[in-house]
Image (cartoon, rainbow, N blue to C red):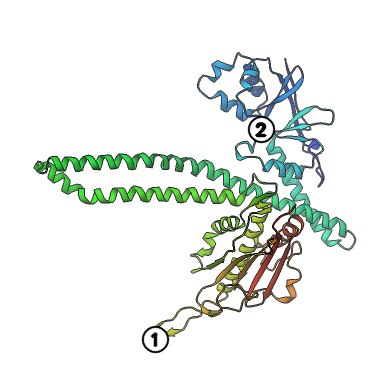
């Protein structure tokens, strides 16, 4: 027995900031597990926009089959002949059971956040929505993203209005700021999810294929070279034609260089695999709960993401990186959020140094001994006396990262740069939402605000900034070793 009710709320509703899933267009298409597989194809053919079909057993919910998964599975060899006339329950055994079920009263912003945390293989699958009465409906993931973007625009519009009337509606303005901060975090999470998924599909699989076959290629080449050496021992005086061929291909050089060539390829594939692993460690989209992690691993993954900016060929300067890591235990924290803090602070340090370079502070050279002297800039005494950044003349802009353990209870991470610094009059507003010293289009004023919220509220820690204008800036992060 099939039941098709089509799409409800087809017209896009007027959404609000607190709108829930029940206000979105949804599908009510059901089918019993005893129906043949051909009925699924019929329903999908009747509704070209249908994202999925709800599976029932005697009108009791069993699960869901999405359009994408169904046609992907039916495209396998013999699947059509095997399942088209057999009951759907046989076909459904071969489908993944990882289905996202949300309550109809869940806010759209929260639902988007939860949906984006799914593994990339099922990121675009439809979402089952359960009503208070226990009935199930389907929402297209793209419809959820569309509603999310509308709420984003609505938030921006209302922010502008509330800013003008902030004296009257300060409480509402704070709510909007928190909502917009969450939207920004969701966007970053979505972008990271796409990055990791793209790398996993487009790079990881072929690299694994190459790495796996390189092992055999090295073995085969060694066997062939051993066979050639055996021939040379048994037939030391080959025919003239063979001697000519040996000379043309430079056999001695080939014998020496081929193993080195294959080993270089193996090292290259290993390096790509390390980069992919670092990207996964940085994004940590599958780790929304607190975990015991290595803080240094998160810092290193973040530095790898920023590697192209540390070695910036456009401005003609590399940023020297100094690291002094203490022997830290595993830290109980929210790793994805903490990596976001590292990213925000390090990106700001790079921006400050680039601003100093573009202003010409590192661009003035002198001639020494008849030759062009090195471009030098006097490095400041760092805000924290123990930072290993040198106090002498250096031609290099620098970023210093230092960690330490205090009484086995607290961890301190210091990130210092010798960039342009921050005026004292602006330092008190650094962690205010939407406050930025960057030009229009280069900063949202949310990076440090989000970082402060993550450290203080999520990790019960402290985030402090010490800066001297024209000399440099140091951010000090202090978090407990154990949250609970």
Which is more toward the observer, 154 or 454?
Answer: 454
Side (left or right) of 463 relative to 283: right
Quarter of the picture holding the N terminus: top right
Measure how far apart labels 2 and 1 are at the Cα level. 71 Å
Q: Residue at x 38, y 48 (%)?
A: 265
- For disc 1, the marked residue is 369
Side (left or right) of 271 relative to 296: left
Residue 342 in view (yes/no) = yes
Mark 1 residue element? loop
Q: Residues within 10 Å of mark 2 (few under 14, many from 20)?
A: few
Counting from the top left corner in percent of width and height, residue 27 is at: 74, 29
Q: How many marks?
A: 2
In the orientation shown, which residue stands out farthest toward the bottom?
Answer: 369
Q: Residues within 10 Å of mark 1 (few under 14, many from 20)?
A: few
Q: For residue 335, which numbered disc appears in the image?
A: none
Splitting the image into 4 quarters, where does residue 165 fall?
bottom right
- Asked if the residues shown at circle 2 and circle 1 are in contact, with their CB atoms under 8 angstroms apart, the answer is no
- For disc 2, the marked residue is 98
The numbered mark, 2 or 1, whose residue comes first in the sequence reads 2
Counting from the top left corner in percent of width and height, residue 370 is at: 38, 85
Mark 2 residue element? loop
401 in relation to 149, above or below: below
22 in relation to 88, above or below: below
Counting from the top left corner in percent of width and height, residue 425 is at: 74, 75
Q: Residue at x 36, y 39 (%)?
A: 216
Counting from the top left corner in percent of width and height, residue 311 is at: 50, 64
372 in relation to 400, above or below: below
Residue 250 in view (yes/no) = no
Side (left or right) of 397 relative to 45: left
475 in relation to 268, above or below: below
């Amino acid at each position: 027995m099939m039941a098709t009710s089509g799409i409800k709320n087809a017209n896009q509703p007027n959404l609000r900031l607190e709108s829930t899933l029940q206000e979105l267009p949804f599908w009510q298409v059901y089918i019993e597990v005893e129906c043949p597989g051909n009925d699924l194809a019929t329903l999908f053919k009747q509704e070209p926009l249908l994202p999925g079909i709800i599976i029932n057993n005697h009108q009791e919910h069993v699960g869901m089959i999405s359009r994408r998964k169904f046609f992907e599975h039916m495209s396998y060899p013999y699947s059509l002949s095997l399942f088209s006339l057999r009951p759907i329950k046989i076909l459904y055994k071969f489908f993944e059971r990882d289905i996202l079920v949300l309550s109809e009263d869940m806010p759209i912003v929260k639902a988007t956040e939860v949906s984006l945390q799914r593994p990339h293989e099922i990121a675009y699958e439809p979402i089952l929505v359960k009503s208070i009465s226990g009935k199930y409906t389907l929402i297209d993931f793209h419809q959820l993203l569309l509603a999310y973007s509308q709420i984003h625009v609505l938030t921006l519009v209302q922010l502008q209005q509330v800013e003008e009337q902030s004296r009257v509606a300060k409480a509402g303005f704070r709510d909007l700021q928190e909502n917009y901060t969450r939207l920004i975090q969701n966007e970053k999470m979505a972008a990271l999810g796409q990055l990791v998924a793209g790398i996993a599909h487009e790079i990881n699989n072929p690299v694994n294929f190459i790495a796996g076959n390189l092992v055999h290629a090295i073995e085969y080449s060694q066997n062939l070279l051993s066979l050639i050496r055996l021939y040379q021992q048994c037939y030391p005086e080959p025919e003239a034609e063979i001697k000519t061929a040996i000379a043309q291909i430079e056999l001695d050089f080939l014998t020496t260089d081929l193993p080195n060539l294959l080993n270089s390829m193996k090292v290259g594939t290993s390096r790509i695999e390390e980069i992919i692993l670092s990207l996964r460690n940085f994004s940590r989209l599958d780790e929304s709960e607190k975990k015991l992690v290595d803080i240094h691993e998160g810092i290193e993954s973040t530095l790898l993401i920023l590697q192209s900016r540390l070695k910036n060929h456009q401005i003609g300067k590399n940023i020297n990186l100094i690291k002094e890591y203490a022997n830290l235990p595993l830290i109980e924290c929210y790793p994805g959020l903490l990596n976001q803090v590292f990213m925000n602070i390090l990106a700001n340090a790079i921006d400050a140094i680039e601003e100093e370079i573009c202003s010409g502070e590192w661009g003035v050279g002198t001639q020494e001994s008849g030759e062009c002297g090195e471009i030098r800039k006097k490095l400041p005494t760092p805000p924290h006396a123990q930072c290993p950044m040198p106090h002498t003349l250096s031609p290099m802009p620098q970023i210093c990262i230092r960690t330490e353990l205090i009484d086995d209870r607290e961890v301190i991470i210091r990130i210092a740069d010798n960039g342009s610094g921050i005026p004292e009059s602006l330092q008190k507003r650094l962690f205010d939402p939407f406050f930025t010293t960057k030009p229009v289009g280069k900063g949202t004023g949310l990076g440090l605000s989000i970082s402060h919220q993550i450290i203080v509220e999520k990790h019960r820690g402290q985030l402090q900034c010490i800066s001297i204008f024209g000399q440099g800036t140091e951010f000090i992060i202090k978090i407990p070793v154990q949250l609970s």
